[in-house]
Image (cartoon, grey):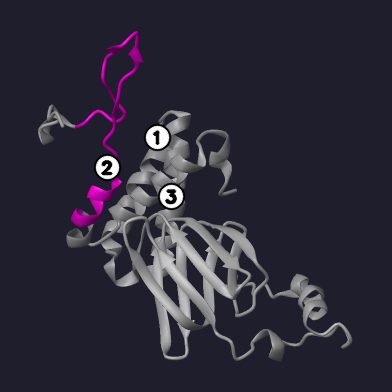
Amino acid sequence: MSSAWRTHITFNKYSQIAARAVRNSLKESERVKAEKRGLTALRYQKWEDGKGGEQVWLNPPEESKGGQKVV
Amino acid sequence: MAAIRSIASARSLSALRRAPVVAFRRGYAEAASNEALKVSLVLPHQPLYNSSDAVQVNISAASGDMGILANHVPSVEPLKAGVIEIIEQSGTKKWFASGGFATVHPNNTLTINAIEAAPLDDFALEAVRQNLAEVQKVLAGNASEHEKVEARVELDVYEALQHALSK
């Protein structure tokens, strides 16, 4: 069955994987444009007693892309 | 397998609403009335297509391929990776979508939301074959169960793409 993934991953994850697979199948020129859409950049930190905790990347950026960029 | 799901369940409902005296009969002529189906196909980052005179829309729903005509019963269908085909009087347009939802609204409107979609011309068959081979290698190897589940999802996408492109 095609819905065998349900016991292992969420629908969000499933659609993420399927979308990535579609992007990877595009022609070279289209793929470069499309690949940027697959990136999720999010950093979060927990505040307690007025102090910010450690900042955590949701998806650690790759070093090669200058991931230490502070926004 | 293109099972065209008709509006059987809407039969009694709309017959009741429109002509309570007339017998409960609803033929194809009424189903395919002059009123054309309005369709919109959108991605999170861009609207792909908008049509106000679609004759039929073929989608690959999670429960199977289906064709939607005008005045379809309102419904929500989750999509699996596959071809979305919009047939208009003037011609046919095709996209390949990764998944999403197709919603038929009561006002004869169909909205399709996909995560990622592109015209069939934008795909490279060579890349699909290559990806397919890689995924099959993962499935045959001793990857973890989690990796294999992901690989199987990708396998479905690549197989559907290969099928769509080689037609």
* Residue B104 located left or right of residue A62: right
Residue B155 bears which disc, if any? 3
Image quadrant containing the C terminus of chain B: bottom left
Q: Is residue B123 visible from the viewing direction of this image?
A: yes
Check the image and name the residue furthest to the top: A49
Q: Earlier in the sequence, mark 3 or mark 1?
A: 1
* Residue B11 forms part of the magenta stretch: no
Please provide the residue range marked out in magenta.
Answer: A32-61
Image point (76%, 77%), residue name = B14
Disc number lying in front (3 or 1): 3
Q: Quadrant of the N terminus of chain B?
A: bottom right
Q: Residue at x 16, y 32 (%)?
A: A71
Mark 3 and mark 1 residues within 8 Å of each other at the beta carbon: no
Q: Residue at x 27, y 15 (%)?
A: A54
Name the residue carrying label 1.
Answer: B141
Q: CA distance from mark 3 to mark 1?
A: 14 Å
Chain bearing mark 1:
B
CA gap between label 2 and label 3 equals: 22 Å
Q: Secondary structure at mark 2?
A: loop
Residue B44, percent from left and from top: 36, 55
Q: Amino acid under label 3?
A: Leu
Q: Residues under labels 2 and 1: Cα distance?
A: 28 Å
Q: Which residue, given by chain and number where applicable, does mark 2 sit on?
A: A39
Q: Is residue B24 left or right of residue A62?
A: right
Disc 2 chain ID: A
Task: Report in which chain the residue with disc 3 lies.
Answer: B
